[in-house]
Amino acid sequence: TQLLEQSPQFLSIQEGENLTVYCNSSSVFSSLQWYRQEPGEGPVLLVTVVTGGEVKKLKRLTFQFGDARKDSSLHITAAQPGDTGLYLCAGPNYGGSQGNLIFGKGTKLSVKP
Amino acid sequence: ETGVTQTPRHLVMGMTNKKSLKCEQHLGHNAMYWYKQSAKKPLELMFVYSLEERVENNSVPSRFSPECPNSSHLFLHLHTLQPEDSALYLCASSQVYRGNQPQHFGDGTRLSIL
C-alpha cells in the first residue's frame, strides 16, 4: 500500500520566518501534487511535480521533487498570514495511468502577524 | 458560476433522518469524486464516477448512497448515519479519471450527526 507521510503535522510561526514541510514515501510516485486548504474551504492545487529532482517556484513557495521520486518538499520564504492553511501532498495510486489520488494527512500551518 | 459548488455548506441531522448532499461542477470534467475528511486522518476517497458510471466504491457503508445523474451533478444520499460519520464531505472533479490528474474541489459540506 502506498502511503504519504507529511511532517511536521503542525507548524506555528511568526510572519517573515522561513519554513519547510516534507512529504515522504517508501514508494516511487510518477508525480506528486501539492494542495493548500484554507479554513472553511476545499483544497486548491498549488503545483504538480513530475520529474525527479525538479524544482518549481510559485512566488515565495519553492517545491522540490526528490531525485528518486519518493519524496517532496515545500519551502516558504518570508511567510505571511495569508499562507495559513493545511498543506496536502497527493500522488497517483496506481502509477498514474489510471487510478486515484492518495493524500497525506497534511501539515497545518499557522502564520501569526 | 464556475468551479465546483457544494450544497448545503453545513448540515446537522439526527441518526434517523434522510438527507442528500449536492455537488455541481461547471468545468466540463468527466470524473467526479466524493471524499470524507476527518480530523487526524488523510482524505478518504469514498466514490468515483467517470462518464456517469461508478468506477470506485471504497468499502463505504451502505448508509451512504451516491448518484450521478449527469456529468455535471453528483449527489450523496444519507440515511441512518452514525455519530462517527460527522466530518467534512468534499466533492471534487477532474478532466478525466486518471491518477495524475489535478482535482478541483468544492468547499465541502460540514456534517454533524446528533
Image (tube, coloured by chain):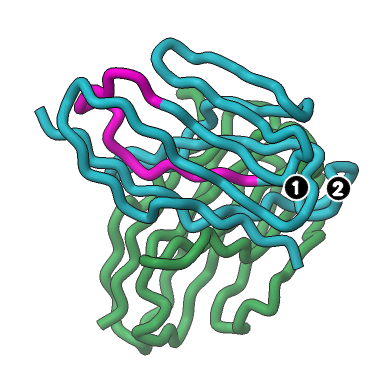
Left or right relative to B43: residue A68? right
Q: A54 or B86, which is in the foreground? A: A54
Residue count near mark 2 (Cα–Cα under 10 Å), binned few <14, some 14–19, many ≥20: some
Q: Position of residue B35 (x, y in %)?
A: 55, 59
Residue type (three-letter) at the residue carrying disc 2:
Gly
Residue type (three-letter) at the residue carrying disc 1:
Pro
Q: Residue furthest front?
A: A67
Q: A96 or A53, which is in the foreground? A: A53
Q: Chain of mark 1?
A: A
Q: Are marks 2 and 1 in contact (CB under 8 Å)?
A: yes
Quarter holding residue A69: top right
Q: Which chain is cyan?
A: A
**Which mark is on residue A95?**
2
Query: Is B9 above or below relative to B76?
Result: above
Q: Position of residue A62 (x, y in %)?
A: 50, 21
Question: What colour is chain B?
Answer: green
Q: Secondary structure at mark 1?
A: strand
Quarter holding residue B95: top right
Residue linked to disc 1? A92
CA gap, disc 2 to disc 1? 6 Å
Residue range highlighted in magenta: A76-90
